[in-house]
């Protein structure tokens, strides 16, 4: 998928991209991706569910209601560490405050979905949380990426590719109307 992007052209309660992994235990996780959207409502672009928890790791954006959004292209990274219980979000290479999440590992068979929020394991999508826009450069690691590596990811410098999801060699399944197009930020 190097040089490609996924296009989610419309609101839907079914269209999504699904990844599976053989991993069944994660003590730490980092997910990074780039996206472009003009949505002004809440939306989900990354959802990792297990049979026990539909929101084991969820990247969801809820813009302010009075915010005027034209097109927002952002680089986003989320981290979750079971040992410390800390979660953190990085937007365009800038960190948020660390917050207390959960001290438990993510365990069990994992379903990873782009473009929808899994309200149950592998499904129960809500059209009002669907993503409309473009997603590219998705990587996922089984450790907390260092601030320097997150900065490098944001700047498109050299960074370690994901060891769980690697955009350059990822396998996935598309359901519904999701298109693969040339990444518009590639020359």
Image (tube, helix red, strand yellow):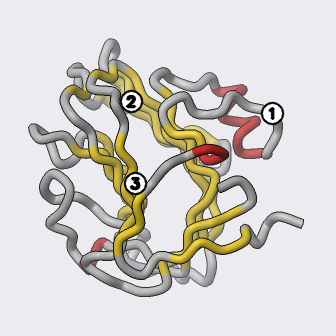
Rendering coords of residue 17 (x, y %): 40, 62
Residue 42 shows up from this direction = yes
- Name the quadrant containing residue 10: bottom left
How far, Cα to Cα, is label 1 from label 2? Answer: 23 Å
Residue count near mark 2 (Cα–Cα under 10 Å), binned few <14, some 14–19, many ≥20: many
Q: Which residue is mark 3?
A: 46
Residue at 22% x, 47% y is: 55
Given the current orientation, which residue lies at the most extreme top position? 83
Foreground: 47 or 179?
A: 179
Of badges 3 and 2, nearer the viewer stands 3
Q: Is residue 178 above or below residue 172?
A: below
Q: Tell me, for residue 80, which label it has, or none.
A: 2
Could you say whether the residue bearing mark 3 is in a helix, strand or loop? strand
Quarter in which the N terminus is drawn? bottom right
In this rendering, position of residue 148 left or right of residue 175? right
- The numbered mark, 1 or 2, whose residue comes first in the sequence reads 2
Residue in view at x 65 percent, y 33 percent:
161
Which tag, 3 or 2, sits closer to the chain's start? 3
Displayed quadrant of residue 74: bottom right
Mark 1 lies on residue: 158
Is residue 96 visible to us here?
A: no
Does the CB distance between marks 3 and 2 fall below 8 Å? Answer: no
Q: Are marks 1 and 2 in contact (CB under 8 Å)?
A: no
The vertical placement of 98 against 48, above or below, is above
- Marks 3 and 2, how far apart at CA: 14 Å
Residue 122 position within the rendered picture, expressed as x and y whole percent measured from the top left: 20, 55
Q: Secondary structure at mark 2?
A: strand
């Amino acid at each position: 998928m190097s040089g490609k992007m996924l296009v989610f052209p419309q609101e839907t309660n079914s269209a999504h991209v699904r990844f599976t992994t053989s991993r069944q235990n994660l003590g730490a996780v980092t997910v990074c991706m780039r996206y472009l959207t003009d949505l002004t409502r809440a939306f989900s672009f990354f959802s990792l569910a297990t049979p026990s928890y539909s929101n084991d790791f969820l990247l969801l954006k809820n813009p302010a209601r009075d915010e005027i959004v034209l097109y927002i292209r952002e680089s986003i990274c989320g981290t979750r560490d079971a040992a410390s219980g800390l979660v953190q979000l990085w937007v365009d290479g800038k960190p948020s405050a660390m917050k207390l999440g959960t001290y438990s590992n993510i365990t069990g068979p994992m379903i990873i979905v782009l473009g929808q929020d899994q309200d149950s394991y592998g499904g129960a999508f809500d059209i009002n949380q669907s993503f409309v826009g473009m997603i590219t450069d998705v990587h996922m690691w089984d450790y907390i990426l260092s601030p320097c590596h997150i900065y490098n990811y944001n700047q498109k410098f050299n960074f370690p590719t994901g060891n769980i999801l690697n955009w350059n060699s990822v396998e996935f399944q598309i359901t519904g109307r999701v298109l693969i197009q040339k990444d518009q930020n590639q020359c």
